[in-house]
């Protein structure tokens, strides 16, 4: 017993968690129709099949558009909300913060059903806009948490210096505050994109008929059969949701280095 | 360059009054210091002149124009902060050029004026670097360059030397004064450091608890304090409570413990109205310790040295004369007096100041 045992145990846990993912990635390059080891050869045929699968490509486009719009709206609202909460004395500040952060704490199913019921009550049907709104509500807390933390670290006197030099409050925001906030805005945007891209629970409730995102497409494909195409699609998802944030972090780091930080 | 006038300014934060009815007139080109302990309202006053705070009552007049309703970015002021407040994502040259971009200055002129400003603060070669690559003192010089390059009507300095270490602070003091004199800009300087105030100012405004205690030239404020607070805040003073027993055109005579009757010249007792309770202020460095009684008309009393604080060229003595504790700061000639030594303590009446009791 001791450290050796703990180490072994840890490795086993990680294997248990990540081996299935590795198998999916591996099998997506399999030449054979049936997923079995040893693999008989490498091939990109499933990616090709994916590329030619109109339904999957449509879902992919929907997911990307949805993710980008979610990221755009969430970061805009998140920056505005953070500014209001950090820089101004708003009555009921703590309550507002709690409400804005609440979607993280509420189970997603509850949130999904609640929004759906609320819009039914208002007589508004399911639409892409509703789906987008749901994703924004769900990703906004992440953006606010990241942006607020950064904004607190930006000294007020830097903004005051810009004002004293003749920049109007709006000019000060765009020339000083926003550039200094940019790392947090980018991180928040990436968060929002990957969460939106990855989301299935809320999406299943909110999506209008005929619209599929990548996760719901996989879900419905799985109901019929387990096609190797799904492995390829899974690999694409992994690259998108893991690779993008890593890429973002790398870019942020190289920018910081250039500034002599 | 403009004069600054505060006309019955009041600033309240809820129930708390940060600045009580204050009027102040700062002439064009003057270097005026707001001096006081933290919480005395000096920074609040500066921020009201800057336009970062709105006065609750009263008017702020810059260059003859009421600016209460003019937002900060239209006031044309240079502002320097304690923590430099340079823009970390811009190079030094971009920092200095920032204010010029909002003033329709042609590109070629911007480059030239930025270089002139960097030359003025004696950092001509750092334009391409980022603020982080500079030392604290260099960053503050850049902040100063950034504030003066726009040729502000008034330069506002909020404890600009406080974040620097001691040696650098004294160099920067001289430097700041040199630059201010060179460009002749009206300057309001906020500090809690009396030596900075005494060394740099044309006028010192001593503040306490949101009120102005005294306004005057450094020598006047130092030698003829208008209140006990000013006497205690600037330098080390002995303050003896007593009675004014005679008051006339040529001065006042005070009767105090230890020294008895002392005739204070009128110039050193301007705030004394007549006979009655009064206080005598004796600067610690005007109280002289002697082995033998001097023969120069000084008032001399015996005292005991209770403690000695050796400071190199001078020493600070804690003394007891009768029941009264006194302190003195004397230059050391030969060697300092020892603890427990019996000494002759002498003062000249013209070195004393009198305050109403």
Image (cartoon, coloured by chain):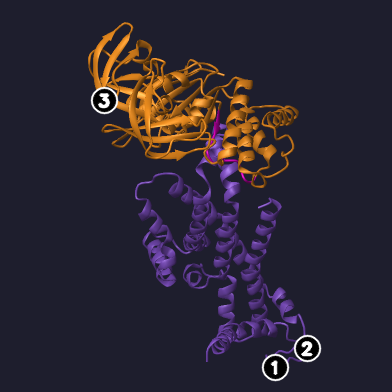
Chain colours: A purple, B orange
| Secondary structure mostly seen in the magenta stretch | loop
Pointer 1 residue: A37
Q: Is residue B179 above or below residue A132?
A: above
* B84 within the magenta span: yes
Q: Mark 3 lies on which chain?
A: B
Q: Which of marks 2 and 3 is in front?
A: 3
Give the residue at x 38% y 21%: B347
Residue B100 spot, x, y in % from top left: 65, 30
The residue nearer to you, when weighing B274 against B256, is B256
Label 1 in the same subunit as label 2: yes
Question: Is any atom of residue B10 visible in this view?
Answer: no
Residue B35 spot, x, y in % from top left: 44, 29
Pointer 3 residue: B257
The residue nearer to you, when weighing B230 against A70, is B230
Left or right for B278, reference B306: left
Give the residue at x 43% y 68%: A112
Pointer 2 residue: A41
Q: What stretch is highlighted in magenta?
A: B78-89
Q: Residue farthest to the left? A: B276
Please identify the quadrant where the N terminus of chain B is shown. Answer: top right
Label 1 SS: loop
Q: Distance between the residues labelled 1 and 2?
A: 10 Å
* A97 within the magenta span: no
Give the residue at x 64% y 39%: B138
Left or right for A19, reference B274: right
Q: Distance between the residues labelled 2 and 3?
A: 108 Å
Label 3 in the same subunit as label 1: no
């Amino acid at each position: 017993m001791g450290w050796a045992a703990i180490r072994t145990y840890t490795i086993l846990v990680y294997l248990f968690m990540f081996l299935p993912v590795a198998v999916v990635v591996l099998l997506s390059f399999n030449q054979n129709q049936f997923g079995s080891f040893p693999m008989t050869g490498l091939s990109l045929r499933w990616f090709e099949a994916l590329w030619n699968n109109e339904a999957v490509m449509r879902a992919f486009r929907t997911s990307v558009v949805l993710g980008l719009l979610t990221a755009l709206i969430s970061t805009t609202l998140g920056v505005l909300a953070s500014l209001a909460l950090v820089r101004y004395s708003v009555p009921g500040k703590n309550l507002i913060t709690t409400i804005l952060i609440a979607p993280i704490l509420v189970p997603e199913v509850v949130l999904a059903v609640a929004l759906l019921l609320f819009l039914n009550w208002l007589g508004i049907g399911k639409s892409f806009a509703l789906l987008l709104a749901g994703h924004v509500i769900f990703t906004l807390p992440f953006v606010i948490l990241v942006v607020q933390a950064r904004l607190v670290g930006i000294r007020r006197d830097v903004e005051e210096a810009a004002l004293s030099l003749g920049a109007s409050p709006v000019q000060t925001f765009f020339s000083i505050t926003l550039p200094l906030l940019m790392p947090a805005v980018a991180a928040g945007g990436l968060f929002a994109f990957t969460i939106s891209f990855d989301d299935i629970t809320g999406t299943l409730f909110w999506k209008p008929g005929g619209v599929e995102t990548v996760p719901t497409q996989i879900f419905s494909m799985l109901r019929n059969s387990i096609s190797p195409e799904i492995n390829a699609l899974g690999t694409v998802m992994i690259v998108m949701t893991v690779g993008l944030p890593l890429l973002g972090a790398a870019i942020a780091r190289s920018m910081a280095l250039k500034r002599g930080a | 360059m403009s004069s600054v006038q505060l006309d019955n300014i009041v600033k309240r934060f809820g129930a708390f009054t940060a600045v009580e009815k204050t009027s102040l007139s700062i002439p064009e080109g003057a270097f005026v210091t707001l001096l006081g302990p933290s919480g005395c309202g000096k920074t609040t006053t500066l921020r009201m002149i800057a336009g970062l705070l709105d006065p609750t009552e009263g008017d702020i007049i810059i260059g003859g124009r009421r600016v209460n309703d003019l937002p900060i970015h239209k006031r044309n002021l240079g502002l320097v902060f304690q923590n430099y407040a340079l823009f970390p994502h811009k190079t030094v040259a971009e920092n200095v050029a920032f204010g010029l971009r909002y003033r329709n200055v042609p590109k070629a002129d911007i480059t030239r004026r930025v270089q002139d400003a960097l030359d003025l603060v004696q950092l001509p070669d750092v334009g391409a670097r980022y603020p982080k690559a500079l030392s604290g003192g260099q960053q503050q010089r850049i902040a100063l360059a950034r504030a003066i390059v726009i040729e502000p009507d008034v330069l506002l300095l909020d404890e600009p030397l406080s974040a620097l270490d001691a040696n650098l602070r004294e160099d920067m003091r001289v430097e700041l004064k040199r630059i201010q004199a060179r460009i002749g800009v009206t300057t309001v300087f906020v500090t809690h450091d009396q030596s900075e105030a005494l060394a740099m100012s044309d006028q010192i405004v001593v503040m306490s608890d949101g009120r102005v205690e005294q306004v005057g030239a450094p020598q006047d404020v130092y030698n003829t304090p208008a209140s006990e607070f000013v006497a205690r805040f600037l330098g080390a003073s002995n303050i003896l409570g007593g009675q004014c027993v005679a008051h006339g055109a040529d001065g006042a005579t005070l009767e105090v413990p230890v020294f008895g009757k002392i005739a204070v010249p009128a110039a050193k007792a301007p705030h004394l109205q007549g006979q009655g309770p009064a206080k005598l202020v004796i600067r610690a460095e005007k109280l002289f310790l002697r082995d033998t009684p001097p023969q120069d008309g000084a008032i001399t009393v015996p005292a005991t040295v209770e403690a000695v604080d050796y400071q190199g060229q001078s020493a600070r003595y804690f003394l007891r004369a009768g029941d009264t504790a006194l302190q003195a700061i004397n230059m050391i000639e030969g060697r300092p007096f020892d603890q427990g030594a019996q000494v002759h303590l002498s003062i000249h009446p013209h070195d004393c100041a009198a305050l109403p009791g």
